Each structure stands twice: as C-alpha cells, then as structure tokens.
C-alpha cells in the first residue's frame, strides 16, 4: 500500500511538471528563419530596401527578439528589440532598441510573409545574414512604437 502511494505521488508530481511546461509554452515564442519548418522560408532571407513603392519600411515595434547564428548554433542577440513592417511584414531584430541611446548593434531581417503572433520572436540566420551597425538607424527603415 505504501508503494502504491508513492507511485501515486510520482504521478501527481509528473502531472504538475507537465502543467508547468504547458504554461511555459503559452509564453508565445515564435521561431523564424533559415531551415526552420513552416516559417515562411524565402529565397531572400535578408532584405533591407524593398517595401513596394515606398522609400522606407514602416517598422512598428513588436516585442522582443532573439538572433541565433545557424552556423555556430550560438545566440547572438538575446531579448533584443523586434519590429515588423506594417505593409510588407518584414521583421527585424536589433540588439538595442531603435530610438535609444545605443547603436543598434547586431541585427538581422526575415520575411515571414505573415503578421507576428508572439511577443518574442527568434530568428535563426546564417552568419552572412547577421549584420552589425554602430549607427542608430538603418537605411530604408523607419522605426516607430505603437502610440
Ligand atoms: Zn515593408
């Protein structure tokens, strides 16, 4: 009877751990990028100056972003800034906040061809698609925050 009880307790613990994981999943982390299934893979994963006939992408702030280097497996940017173009859905993750005091630092873009559904977006990119800038702006991009 004692043994049965301990099995019962183990099952209860397993259930509560399962519940904790399910809660973590609902924190909404979306992963886009090179070789990520179902992430809108595109022949031109990196893009800057193409927003139809508009001079600038209208990059509206969209939560936080991570950048993972596909070649090294390392996370280059953790909890950086994420923004998405309101017209063409282009996504950019920058190391530092656009409009802040610091240079943008490491950044990359990705075209998921859909609106972002999560508050945290991870973009997996190859090394040559991860850029660095010591500037606070990127040509062809206009950053803004929701009013
Ligand atoms: Zn655009």
Image: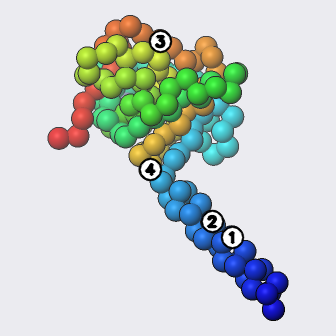
Which residue was labeled with disc 4?
117
Q: Secondary structure at mark 2?
A: helix
Q: Residues within 10 Å of mark 2 (few under 14, many from 20)?
A: few
Ligand 1 under 8 Å from disc 3 Cβ: no
Q: CA distance from mark 4 to mark 3?
A: 26 Å
How far is mark 1 from mark 2, CA to CA? 5 Å
Asked which quadrant contains residue 73, the reply is top right
Tell me the mark number nearer the camera, choosing from 4 and 2.
Answer: 2
Dot 3 crowding, Cα within 10 Å, few <14, some 14–19, many 20+: some
First reached walking from the N terminus: tag 4 or tag 2: 2
Secondary structure under the numbered disc 3 in the rendered image: strand
Is residue 110 in view from this perspective?
Answer: no
Residue found at x 53% / y 37%? 122
User: Which dot, 4 or 3, sits closer to the camera?
Assistant: 3
Left/right of residue 147 with respect to residue 94 in the rendered view: left
Ligand 1 under 8 Å from disc 1 Cβ: no
Sequence-first disc among 4 and 3: 4
Q: Whole-percent x and y of residue 147?
A: 17, 41
User: Outermost residue toward the front?
Assistant: 2
Residue 29 pos. (x, y %): 51, 47
What is the distance, in whole Å, between disc 1 and disc 3 at their CAs?
44 Å
Q: How many numbered marks have been drawn onto this rendered protein structure? A: 4
Distance from Cα at disc 4 to Cα at disc 2? 26 Å
Give the number of the mark in front: 1 or 3: 1
User: Is residue 92 found left or right of 142 in the rendered image?
Assistant: right
Disc 2 or 3, which lies upstream in sequence? 2
| Residue linked to disc 2 | 17
Q: CA distance from mark 1 to mark 4?
A: 30 Å
Mark closest to the chain's N terminus, 1 or 3: 1
């Amino acid at each position: 009877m004692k043994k049965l009880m301990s099995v019962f307790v183990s099952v209860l613990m397993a259930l509560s751990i399962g519940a904790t994981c399910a809660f973590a999943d609902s924190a909404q982390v979306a992963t886009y990028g090179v070789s990520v299934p179902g992430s809108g893979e595109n022949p031109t994963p990196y893009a800057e100056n193409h927003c139809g006939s508009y001079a600038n992408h209208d990059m509206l702030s969209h939560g936080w972003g991570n950048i993972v280097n596909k070649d090294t497996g390392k996370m280059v940017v953790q909890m950086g800034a994420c923004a998405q173009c309101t017209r063409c859905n282009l996504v950019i993750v920058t190391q530092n906040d656009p409009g802040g005091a610091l240079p943008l630092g490491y950044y990359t873009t990705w075209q998921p061809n859909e609106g972002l559904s999560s508050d945290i977006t991870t973009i997996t990119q190859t090394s040559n698609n991860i850029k660095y800038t010591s500037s606070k702006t990127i040509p062809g991009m206009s950053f803004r925050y929701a009013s």
